[in-house]
Amino acid sequence: MALLELNKVKKIYQQGKIEVPALRGIDLTVEQGEFTTIFGPSGSGKTTLLNMIGCLDTPTEGEIRLNDKKVSDLSRKELAMTRRYNIGFVFQSYNLIPVLTAYENVEFAIRLTDHTSESQMKEKVLKMLAEVGLKGLESRRPNELSGGEKQRVAIARALVKEPKLVLADEPTANLDSETAAGVVDIMRKMNKELNTTFIFSTHDPMVMKYANRFINLKDGMISADERRG
Amino acid sequence: MKFLWNLAKKNLSRSRIRTSVSIVAIAFAILAVVFARGLINGMLESFFENHIHYKAGHIRVIDEEYKLKERLMSLNYTLDGFNGKGYSEMIEKIKSVEGVEQVVPRLKFGAIVSLEDELVGMMGWGVDPLEEIKFMGIDKNITEGRMVQEGNKEVVMGAGLLEKIGREVGEKVTILYTTPFGSFKGSTFQIVGKYQSDIQVMSDKLFFLPLGQAQRILEMPGEVTELLLITSNHDKAASVLPGLNELFSQEDESGKYTLQIWNKGYDLIELFDFAVKMYNSIYIFIIILSCFVLVNTLIMIINERTREIGMMSALGLKSREILYLFTMEGAIIGILGSALGTVLGGILTRVFSVVGIDYSAAYEGIESTDFLMSPIYYTVFSLENLVFCFVLGVVITTIACVIPARKAAKLEPTEALRQI
């Protein structure tokens, strides 16, 4: 059973009286554990597609199934709950909460989903931060961390609740190549160790080097879909 | 939800100046409301006390017609007891009604003192000295000499009145008056005391004489103009009315007497009742005004943190939780502002409950016996006022926060994440 299925997914934005199609009928199946990149020129619909997959938005037409559950016509609240328990997000600009420490930012995600004891929760958060190489930096706030460290916190936040799917929208766009390589390395490691499915939107060839599936989007349609390794 | 509450607290440190400005705005409003309520309560308490002492008691028994002629100090509509059996018997029967603790008889009449080139108008009150001491603590206001004693031909005069007529305690005074039968008479009394009232009109016009003496000179044996009934608490006086009504329906065959509770049928009291309701609206309005600062702050916060709201949505926060987060941020400001305002307002109210605010200049020249305001207002410092204002502040600010918080909760995650 596929983790994710998209059938003839269309998204049309209304700009005044003009209809702007962002996705023109996407058919896509993603299996558990895949490390997939979605690439394509600006305006090709990468972010829109990630939003649909991530249950942040609903399609105008078509069907999306996540974990064999139809999510394309869920209510706002149901979408939130689906995101909470099944999907992790990594953003280009990290989107960490500045008043929280690295530890608390990661803890924030797990508190929404995990109802285990405080000590178990703490253990999980510390372990995840250590996994992404942030041991010893737990009490630092985002403004005391480098770009790479911030993105690692964001990855830890996305992974700590052990989601089935992690979506990353240009996660290395704000990082230098060496830091970006480190960040992608971590995601690849998590992908292997936890069998977490990763879907990226990226322009970064270095990220693409690590991927085992490449989806090329053009004008809101999949123009190429290749698997490697 | 606890972690959202903790986050809300931490978020307030993002812009300390902005948070502080909002807290100070709320604090000022609450301070103003605490002080204003304390002042208004002080004014009302003072007015009610004077009104009860000088005019109404908790319940007043008068002739129905007397109410209309009271200003003229008419002696034609008096109380001569149930079916003319004298007021003393009436007092005894009234005292037997449950809840009536004291009955104070008064015979009020107009009088003058003739000076060489001037007539000085006065109000004479024939009183039972012991009952008045018990009721008004009148002896405490006698700054020189003593209270009149029943049976003696003596008077206690207001300090202003004594000054006006150029007499002193120990001297004699001849009082001119008209009896209910129209005879114009004069009687000479020994001045045995000087009465000091903070109500100017009472100090300038009032004199007391023993009730028996008043009845004698006015040729009104067994009559008074009013009986003031005192209960355990003026706020609960209405509960005594059914028993009194029953007594009067049985005993007062003529049906000429009326029972007037202290807060009904007096124009100024009813005006104050309305004013209190209006003041309550003003208090709420003041707090709502201060909420504009808070709402504005929250709108700025939400605009600045739109992406963060998008991120939180992506993490799976429900709209309700985002609403809670931002409402709590505003509520914390409301709680801190209300607490600060309550403390400062409490201190200010406490200070002015001791030193008072002198309004005497504003009251100069007011000679109405209806306007029984003391010229110095003392604010009332009460825990009830502090708790009321604090709770009012927190409730109104929290409700106000829901407006911008709803805006945050309604943001579409994709729109929010696109925000630069």
Image (cartoon, coloured by chain):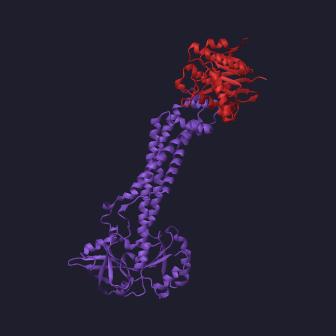
Chain colours: A red, B purple
**Is residue B19 depicted above or below B156 in this figure?**
above
Determine whether B14 is above or below A136 in the image: below
Nearer-the-camera pick, B403 or B377: B377
Residue A202 in sight:
no
Looking at the image, residue B52 sits to the left or right of residue A152; the answer is left
Seen at 52% across and 85% down, the residue is: B253
Image quarter where the N terminus of chain B lies is top right
In this rendering, the answer to whether A212 lies above or below B209 is: above
- Residue B140, located in which quarter of the rendered image? bottom left
Question: Quadrant location of residue B404?
Answer: top right
Q: Nearer the viewer, residue B83 or B64?
A: B83
Q: Position of residue B41 (x, y in %)?
A: 44, 60
Q: Do we see residue B355 in this rendering?
A: yes
Residue B183 is left or right of residue B308, and the answer is: left
Q: Quadrant of residue A79?
A: top right
Please tell me which residue is depicted at 39% across the width and 56% down the height of the picture: B352
Across and down, in percent, residue B188 comes to 28, 84
Rendered location of residue B376, percent (x, y): 36, 61
At horizontal 38% and vertical 60% (from top left) the residue drawn is B377
From the viewer's perspective, is B400 left or right of B70?
Answer: right
Q: Residue furthest left?
A: B116
Location of residue B175 with respect to B411 vertically, above or below: below
Residue B126 is left or right of residue B241, and the answer is: left
